[in-house]
Image: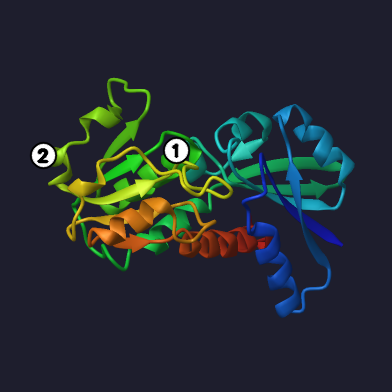
């Protein structure tokens, strides 16, 4: 039995286990299982790997997408450039183990925005600075976007929320929430923007997928914005994870 799973903390919001369990049942994949492994710290990461000899791959979610890179043997080029991973492949051959990090989020992000921005040199505003933000920034820049990042902690190259005014938003077409604000069970949360400044020129994309329609997206839709939910990204990155886990060349 090949085992796969998800690490992060907390994991009550995650649909990954349900997604893969349903996939295995629907596609008659009887030799695989998927489990949640909530870790309050990565100090126990290698114990988890050692105690589960059938474990072949892991997805990685908040808050470990960046920190996990210090616990792997290698990372592919894209993951190295991003500086964050959401996917681990565990290879066990001839009594030796090797953990390789990948980032399938980039596929989910690209698939989510490409239909609305097939060719673009627009400006995107990314909310948050964590591992997901790094993947969004890398992907959007490679699609041709100019990228601005906003955080509660303003730095030289990162805007503060107080900088997000009407003049700035006039030139922005895509706003991406990469923070857990609005995620179950605290569904009332949302980024601290002046939503009255948004209109039909803007597209809002929320990486949070539980609930599908977050407070952030609802506020935008009320003001005429196009919205992109996190489910498209979830499905796309999950399928890319499965491809990587089963590709013998990787």
Instruction: Please say if 209 is above or below 161.
Output: below
Task: Write down the quadrant of residue 64 in the picture.
Answer: top right
Q: Seen in the image, is 171 located left or right of residue 184?
A: left
Q: Position of residue 130 (x, y in %)?
A: 47, 35
Residue drawn at (45%, 43%) of the image: 189
Q: Residue at x 37, y 61 (%)?
A: 228
- Report crowding for label 1: few under 14, some 14 to 19, many 20 or more residues within 10 A (C-alpha): few
Residue 175 is situated, as x and y percent measured from the top left of the image, at: 30, 49
Left or right position of 107 against 62: left
Q: Which residue is mark 2?
A: 167
Tell me if residue 50 can be seen: yes
Q: Quadrant of residue 134?
A: top left
- Viewed as shown, does residue 44 lie left or right of 180? right
Q: 10 Å neighbourhood of mark 2: few (<14), some, or many (≥20)?
A: few
Which comes sooner in the sequence, label 1 or label 2?
1
Residues marked 1 and 2 touching at CB (< 8 Å) = no
Q: Secondary structure at mark 2?
A: helix
How far apart in space, not on screen, are marks 1 and 2 (Cα)?
32 Å
The disc at residue 81 is 1
């Amino acid at each position: 039995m090949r085992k796969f799973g998800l690490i992060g903390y907390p994991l009550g919001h995650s649909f990954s286990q349900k997604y893969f369990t349903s996939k295995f049942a629907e596609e008659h994949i009887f030799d695989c299982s998927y489990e949640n492994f909530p870790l309050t710290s990565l100090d126990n990461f290698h114990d988890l790997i050692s105690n589960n000899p059938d474990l072949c791959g892991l997805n990685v979610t908040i808050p470990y997408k960046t920190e996990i890179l210090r616990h792997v043997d290698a990372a592919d080029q894209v993951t190295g450039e991003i500086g964050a991973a959401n996917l681990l492949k565990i290879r066990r051959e001839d009594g030796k183990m090797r953990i390789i990090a990948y980032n399938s989020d980039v596929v989910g992000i690209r698939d989510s925005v490409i239909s609305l921005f097939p060719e673009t040199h627009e400006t995107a505003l990314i909310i948050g600075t964590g591992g997901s933000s790094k993947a969004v920034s890398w992907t959007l820049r490679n699609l041709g976007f100019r990228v601005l990042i906003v955080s509660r902690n303003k730095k030289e190259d990162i805007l503060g929320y107080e900088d997000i005014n009407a003049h700035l938003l006039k030139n922005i077409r895509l706003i991406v929430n990469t923070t857990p604000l609005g995620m179950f069970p605290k569904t009332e949360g949302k980024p601290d923007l002046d939503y009255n400044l948004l209109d039909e020129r803007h597209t809002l994309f929320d990486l949070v997928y539980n609930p599908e329609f977050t407070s952030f997206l609802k506020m935008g839709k009320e003001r005429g914005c196009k919205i992109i939910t996190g489910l498209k990204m979830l499905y796309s990155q999950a399928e890319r994870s499965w491809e990587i886990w089963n590709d013998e060349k990787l």
